Image (spheres, grey):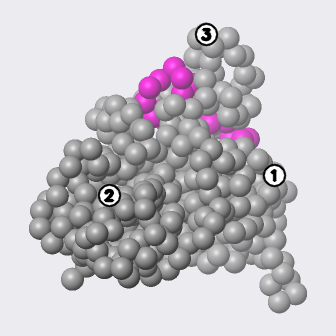
Amino acid sequence: MFISVKEAIKKGSGEVKLRGWCYRARGSNALRFIILRDATDIIQCVVEKDKVSEESWDDAQKIDVEASFELSGEIVEDKRAPTGYEVKVKEIKLIGESIGWPIQKDQSTELLADLKHLWLRSRYMTSILKIRSTVFGAIHEYFRSKGFYEFQSPIFQATQAEGGSTLFSVNYFGKPVYLAQTWQLYAEPAIFALEKIYTIAPSFRAEKSKTSRHLTEYWHAEMEVAWATFKDIQDYGEELIKHVIKRVLEKNQEELKILNRDTKILEKVRDEPFIRMTYTDALKELKEKCNIDIEWGKDLRTIEEDELSKLHNQFLIVTNYPKEVKAFYMKEDDTDPKVVHGCDFIAPECYGEIIGGSERESDLEKIRTRLLDQGEDPEKYTFYLDTRRYGSVPHGGFGMGVERLISFICHLENIKDAIPFPRTMLRTTP
């Protein structure tokens, strides 16, 4: 029976049967060293010509980078081997040849993006994908442990929620609709039935941006909860991030090591409270400590978020933004109507905004006025406004860009590595 490389290493001695792909190969006319790779790890396999059949030796000579094969042999400890063990091969069989593997060392980022369907096999990408899987599982685990129901909303939507300039328009049987920017307008009606809901789903933003932080299609972890205060929303976001990082630190130490990720900052995020400050205090701090003078009422750009990030080696929750720079559904502050109960979670190490959330406005007329001020027709939002007409309650929620969190956890240079097949302004293939 075939076992995985990790199971073989754990076994440590005796007969094993393995299968996988060639990570590296070298040798001579009498001896071949083949590094076998599977989804769990790598292991060195030694094929000696005079100790295997002629058929096995012929196959061993044909095995090159990324050829698939299977073998049987004896696993023994050898500290000189890449993972501390090697297999003395008794029989080896080539399954699928690989001739002229196109990825070599030190190739350009663009070429690797063109070959992403093959680059996924690298230990670098495999490590990220394993961490990505842990992150998704931990998000589900957190919300379900808190009594949330998973809830889905439509991808095709007739109205905008986050700004018309970032909408993807789709011809829907002769009339325009839009790809979802967020589930929120459809989630809010559901909290009057289920009270606590969440989702992980694709969202789409037509941002004409070529930065290392933007994707046009990304995975969005969103939540909405009835009877929530503004503080509750912040608390949920902090707990979620801490829980995800806790799980990654528990399950993915090997992958973090392959990625050369210093885990001290992750441990700090897991163990210490997030820093909370208002938008006004953030401007004051930027002026006093960074000599950056921002006019009150302007949104924080990436450059300002990064400067704040450098000042605090921990997640920073910035609250109470000016009403003019935030979405129409955010609740006005009762004591200062110029600001809303909206918050952004800014990650350490200049990874930018990870979560955006708010308490939702419950006043029907204020929502109508905000829509008109933003050039929107309130009639298109009748279904949404109905939630305020019939038994409205205090509530709120947030959205988290999953790839942005993965980028921070893995300390990636570019968010495009946080997703298997990135979609950007310039890339729709592979």
Return the residue at label 3.
288
Would you identify the image quadrant in which residue 22 lies? Answer: bottom left
Q: Secondary structure at mark 2?
A: strand
Q: What residue type is disc 1 on?
A: Lys
| Residue 410 x %, y % | 46, 45
**Which residue range is magenta in the image?**
308-327
The answer to whether marks 1 and 2 mark residues whose Cβ atoms lie closer than 8 Å is no
Going by the picture, which residue comes out furthest to the bottom?
173
Q: Quadrant of the C terminus?
A: bottom right
Residue at image location 78% in from the left, 57% down from the top: 425
Q: Residues within 10 Å of mark 2 (few under 14, many from 20)?
A: many
Mark 1 crowdedness (10 Å alpha carbons): few <14, some 14-19, many ≥20: some
Circle 2 sits on which residue? 44
Q: Which mark is residue 208?
A: 1
Q: Nearer the viewer, mark 3 or mark 1?
A: 1
Q: Is residue 98 shown to the viewer in this render? A: yes
> On the rendered image, what quadrant is the N terminus found in?
bottom left
